[in-house]
Image (cartoon, rainbow, N blue to C red):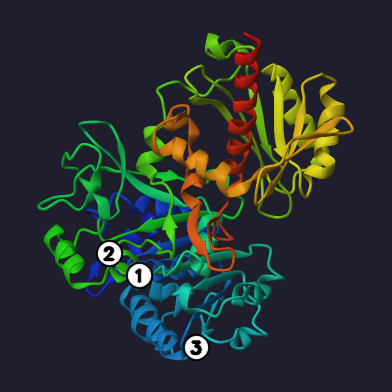
Amino acid sequence: MTKVKLLEFTERFIFLGDDLISFAGRPYLPEVYAAAEGNLILRCGRQVEKSTMLVNIIIYLSVKYRGIKILICCPREEQADFFVLERLIPAIQDSPFVRRVLIGVGQRHLSGRKLNFANGSRVFVRSAFNTADAARGVSADVLIVDEFQDAAPGNLPVLMETLSHSSRKQIILTGTPKGIKNHLDITFCQSTACEWLVPCGQCAERVLLDEKVLGPHTPICPKCGTGIDPRKGLWVPRNPASAWGKGYCISHFLVPWVQYEELIAKQASYGPVQFRNECLGLPTALGDRIVTREEVEACCTKRPMVKRYEDVPREGQGQLVAGIDWGGGANSATVLVIGYMREDREFQVCRFDRFPPNEDSQHVVTEVAKKCRAFRVIAIAADGGGNGHVSNRWLYDKLQTSSPIYSIFYGASDSRPFRDGVLTKWTVDRSASLGLLFTRIKIKSISFPASSDCGSFLDEFLNEYQEFDRYKRTMQFRNPEHLMDDVVHATNYAQTIGHVVRSTLVRSA
């Protein structure tokens, strides 16, 4: 039994009524079930079997690990009662092998919110809508929170205290999204955030299953209009290096019991927000997203990301610049962007680099300096605020070169650069410079390496929104607190200094 994985265990031993559970027609589920041994978050539409999966996980863990303690929390008491009485206990009682292991051979009856099994495993069921107080005093190895979006904000750290004495400390969260600032989506974005992408047979585009694929009779590729089959997709992580754990988004496009005609009918009868949340499993946001995924990916070329100086196009050799957004704290990463401004004033990004948050600052500066030397960077523009105040001077010492380093400060208007010791300070109009960057994307006046190489770097351009500031009476660029935009600013610094270098070359010609 120790070598049997969750999916195999479920298909062999867990009954739904009179029949064993079958996963036929669900090609998206094996990878999701395989991830259930570690931290896992599921951002789902309604009625996609997430409660069934939670039941299967609880039974599997309770059988496999004798004496394990599992805490499951639902927002409201009636949800907690329904889950244990209508879902969990019937699945245990209807499955002969499971019943024998967890209940025993007698007439022992399971009831209530504390289930003590015959093998020593235990399940605690609690509610946590306004407060996590109901879970205080519980000691658990696994914490499961269903309908996590409706639990009180800030409850998760309190609930995680129940795992403090466990060596396992596993967390499983499920829910249906609301806004992008909801804690469900905040946590999802900290996970691997896997999306089910469907390759288009005509143009090879990897299609995200959102509103744009809703054709009149079948899902279509929004790029070329060719019909696509949602079952023939694959999981693609937005954050493959996540330290939090695995995350998956499951929508009505994937489940075999929702016919396409039903999905179209739901779009017509639901409001756009409700349809996006409850059918597509996607969050909604206030404000206007500045660029779309299609616009960003349209700037990608077929060139791979350069790995060495010799890979740089000949016209860019000797003209490379770097933009750096220094990270700090638990979430903000350091991002390095290397590229050059072409003669036609199109900025060409040659490579992106990201250095994880909480990495030693001096080590990050050393690695950035190595990259700048390896690519013979002739000018650098880096964030001058926060950690940049120290990091830029460290970088100058590490480089031991005459290449100028500009410490960039965002302001409400531009001011002329001026020398400040070994550095050059420069205040740049934040709104104007970011506006230029996003205009470049819209008119394809910036180019990125192949989208397959860029991965999650491109996602950060989609995190920026534009809102009207009624006090300053101007449009402001913002991003939700939990979504990173370090790549945006590093690219903005790079294009800004790239423009200066190109203008200098033209004047000296």
Q: Quadrant of residue 325?
A: top right
Q: Amino acid at mark 3?
A: Arg
Q: Are marks 2 and 1 in contact (CB under 8 Å)?
A: yes
Residue 136 shows in this picture: yes
Q: Nearer the viewer, residue 51 or 270?
A: 270
For label 3, the residue is 113
* Percent coordinates x, y for residue 224 in the rendering: 21, 36
Q: Nearer the viewer, residue 103 or 28?
A: 28
Please name the amino acid that badge 1 sits on.
Thr
Could you give the CA–CA distance between mark 1 and mark 3, rounded to whole angstroms? Answer: 18 Å
- Residue kind at label 2, given as amino acid type: Ile
Front label number (2 vs 1) = 1
Horizontal side, residue 297 vs residue 232: left or right: right
Check disc 1 and report the residue beneath it: 52
Residue 357 place in picture, x, y as percent: 70, 47
Name the residue nearer the viewer: 46 or 509.
509
Q: Within 10 Å of the Cα at label 3, are there few (<14), some (14-19), or many (20+) other Cα atoms?
A: some
Report whether 149 appears left or right of 225. right
Decide which of tag 2 and tag 3 comes sooner along the chain. Answer: 2
Which residue is tagged 2? 21
**Residue at 20% from the left image edge and 58% from the top image edge:** 256
Within 10 Å of the Cα at label 1, are there few (<14), some (14-19), or many (20+) other Cα atoms? some
> Mark on residue 487?
none
* Residue 150 coordinates in the image, percent (x, y): 47, 78
Distance, label 2 to label 3, CA atoms, is 25 Å
Quarter of the image with the C terminus in it: top right
Q: Is residue 207 above or below residue 343?
A: below
Seen in the picture, residue 437 relative to 340 is either above or below; the reply is below
First along the sequence among labels 1 and 3: 1
